[in-house]
Amino acid sequence: MSFTIEEKGKPNTLDYRVYFKNSDGKYISPFHDIPLYADEAKNIFHAVVEVPRWTNAKMEIATKDPLNPLKQDVKKGNLRYVCNVFPHKGYIWNYGAIPQTWEDPGHKDEDTGCCGDNDPIDICDIGNKVCSRGEVIRVKVLGTLALIDEGETDWKVIVINVEDPEAEDFNDIDDVRRLKPGYLEATVDWFKMYKVPDGKPENQFAFNGEFKNRDFAIKTVKDTHGYWQALIMKNTEAGELNCMNTCVTDSPFVCSSNDAKAIVDSASAYGEAEPIPSTADKWYYYSK
């Protein structure tokens, strides 16, 4: 199964969007139409790369927009770039989300004591390849970190691209600790500090910031898939989320290919990128 993207609008502007197509050329939602599993028997999952490693434009699946394209997050009317907190430059992994998952804001997690953040579950791909924006990769789940972001559970699932030449050496979170020393500590450090330059306090974590293992992480992914299934079948209130899809045939939100095409056609034409503001390259130094 392969996927392609179609860019609309000018990159680095408010109207920039990245739409998705499947191998049949049909427009799809990366939130709802890309299958959870790439290989269910082997627990290999699909993941959508929103932010390539070393970049800091905060791209995300637009959960409230029709067809859920990627778009850049906006704060106070301005495009959002995650601050560079020394020694980290941009995101330190390929960052993205697992499709057909949802962290239900109406469900209080029994481990964290907090409700979900209303988004698909996040991934941090530790593979060697710097992926491209909108790339759909197949990943092995290795473990998870439970970030508590402004009182909400925001799981960060540690994965590795199965195409990585070292992928067979990584099967659980302890393999990351052993083979990539310092990476997990840097991950906690990054998530703890990345909002501090914006005047916010350090983020907190469940489990005292300890990573949970592969089995725990896979169960968490499967639980969030269950919440998504209730959402897409209208058994849970969607609120502001847009559940339009083209491939979940028994969903009440399914739409025609023509309807999907009309949405993409109505978006601004793709154009030359605007320059990234110089402030996005600023370094911040933080005394812990």
Image (tube, rainbow, N blue to C red):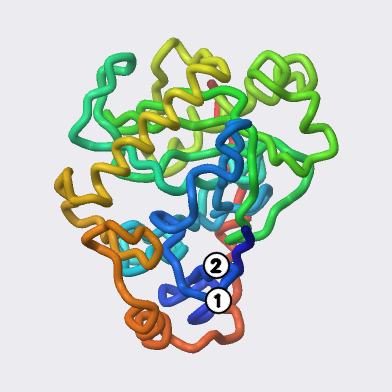
Q: Residue shown at 63%/31% (left/top)?
A: 42
Task: Characterize the local packing of mark 2: few (<14), some (14-19) or many (20 or more) Cα atoms within 10 angstroms.
Answer: some
In the picture provided, is 200 more to the left or to the right than 3?
A: left
Q: Quadrant of the N terminus?
A: bottom right
The image shows residue 128, relative to residue 233, as above or below, that is above
SS at mark 1 in the image: loop
Q: Amino acid at mark 1?
A: Gly
In the picture provided, is 79 more to the left or to the right than 231?
A: right
The picture quadrant where one finds residue 159 is: top right
Reading the image, the residue beneath label 1 is 25
In the picture provided, is 197 more to the left or to the right than 56?
A: left
Residue 1 in sight here: yes
In the picture provided, is 126 more to the left or to the right than 59?
A: right
The picture quadrant where one finds residue 267 is: bottom left
The CA span between labels 1 and 2 is 5 Å
Give yes or no for contact between labels 1 and 2 (Cβ–Cβ under 8 Å).
yes
Question: In front: 237, or 197?
Answer: 237
Q: Residue shown at 45%/55% (left/top)?
A: 60
Q: Residue shown at 18%/34% (left/top)?
A: 106
- Residue 273 at what x, y percent from top left? 60, 79
- Residue 12 at what x, y percent from top left? 53, 71
Q: Amino acid at mark 2?
A: Asn
Checking the image for residue 62, the label placed there is none
Checking the image for residue 22, the label placed there is 2
Q: Residue shown at 61%/84% (left/top)?
A: 272
The image shows residue 102, relative to residue 278, as above or below, that is above
The image shows residue 88, relative to residue 144, as above or below, that is below
